[in-house]
Amino acid sequence: MKITVIDTDKEKCKALAREAALATTVIPVTFVVDEITDDEKIKRLNPPALPAIVIDGKIKSSGKYLTKEEIKEIYKEEFEAAHK
């Protein structure tokens, strides 16, 4: 599962990516967590709001700094949907 955290604020992006990585312990899948802070790349991805969390190419959250628990819930939903 590929997780991309998008934000123009590098420190906040790094912090959110850290939370996203810590939340991966909830399901037995290999994760890759990536950070995008470059304005040009962000424009190409065109998220509705920042910060954004993208999982396997789909925007799952935007406009809010999620907690580790909120991120875990997104992972669980994605995992369950993929294994139906």
Image (cartoon, rainbow, N blue to C red):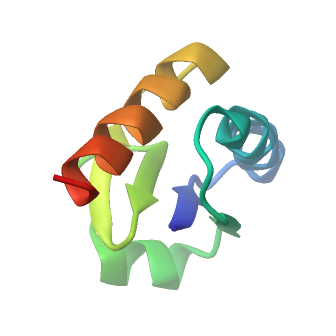
Q: Residue at x 62, y 50 (%)?
A: 28
Q: Is residue 25 visible?
A: yes
Query: For residue 32, what is the image quadrant?
Result: bottom right
Q: How many discs appear?
A: 0
In the rendered structure, the answer to whether residue 56 lies left or right of residue 68 reads left
| 50 in relation to 73, above or below | below
Of residues 37 and 55, the one drawn nearer to the viewer in this rendering:
55
At 65% across and 22% down in the image, what residue appears?
Answer: 68
Q: Going 83% across and 44% down the picture, which residue do you hit?
A: 11
Describe residue 82's horizontal placement relative to residue 29 as left or right.
Answer: left
* Percent coordinates x, y for residue 63 in the rendering: 36, 32
- 24 lies left or right of 57: right
Q: Considering only vertical position in the picture, is 56 above or below 54?
A: below
Residue 59, position in %: x, y?
A: 29, 55
In the rendered image, is residue 47 in sight?
Answer: no
Image position, residue 20 (x, y; %): 67, 41
Q: Residue at x 49, y 84 (%)?
A: 40
Above or below, 49 relative to 32: above
* Residue 18 in picture, x, y percent from top left: 81, 42
